[in-house]
Amino acid sequence: QVQLVESGGGLVQAGGSLRLSCAASGNIFVINTMNWYRQAPGKQRELVAAITSSGSTNYADSVKGRFTISRENAKNTVALQMNSLKPEDTAVYYCNANGTAGGRTFASWGQGTQVTVSS
């Protein structure tokens, strides 16, 4: 069982910044991709940013140039630096990771952290 715990959400004014963090724990052998998703009220969950174990990244068009994903493989952590935030970035942000733990593949989700951007 791999658990993901997020932190760093909150309320910020438009144009401000927030940094989200996520730590994975458990009998982890390897984590392949670590991702950040978000879900706004009434909308489907969408991929915001992804990073592989080798550091390759991918971003949603709506956040390119504003958000930066990073990870520390040795600590099994991933972060999302969010700059120039907009009201449309308001959502619950979820950490997601997949890999191998305890001899099995896993795909785990965090509990979510609320990000609210006021105009």
Image (spheres, rainbow, N blue to C red):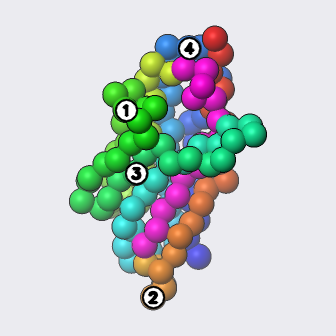
For the C terminus, which image quadrant?
top right
The CA distance from mark 3 to mark 4 is: 24 Å
The CA distance from mark 4 to mark 1 is: 17 Å
Say which residue appears at 53% left-offset and 70% top-offset: 107
Q: Which residues are magenta?
A: 86-99
Dot 1 crowding, Cα within 10 Å, few <14, some 14–19, many 20+: few
Q: Earlier in the sequence, mark 3 or mark 4?
A: 4
Q: Earlier in the sequence, mark 2 or mark 4?
A: 4
Judge left or right: residue 46 versus residue 101. Answer: right
Q: Earlier in the sequence, mark 3 or mark 2?
A: 3
The CA distance from mark 3 to mark 2 is: 24 Å
- What amino acid type is highlighted by mark number 1? Lys
Residue indicated by mark 2: 103
For the N terminus, which image quadrant?
bottom right
Q: Per the image, is 50 magenta?
A: no
Q: Which mark is residue 50?
A: 3
- What amino acid type is highlighted by mark number 2? Gly
- What is the x, y in percent for residue 25? 51, 65
The CA distance from mark 3 to mark 1 is: 12 Å
Residue indicated by mark 4: 14
Nearer the camera: disc 3 or disc 2: 3
Determine whether 12 is above or below 78 in the image.
above
Say which quarter of the image contains residue 93: top right
Nearer the camera: disc 4 or disc 1: 1
Say which residue appears at 56% left-offset and 47% top-offset: 46
Residue 41 or residue 22, whichever sits in front: 41
Residue indicated by mark 1: 64
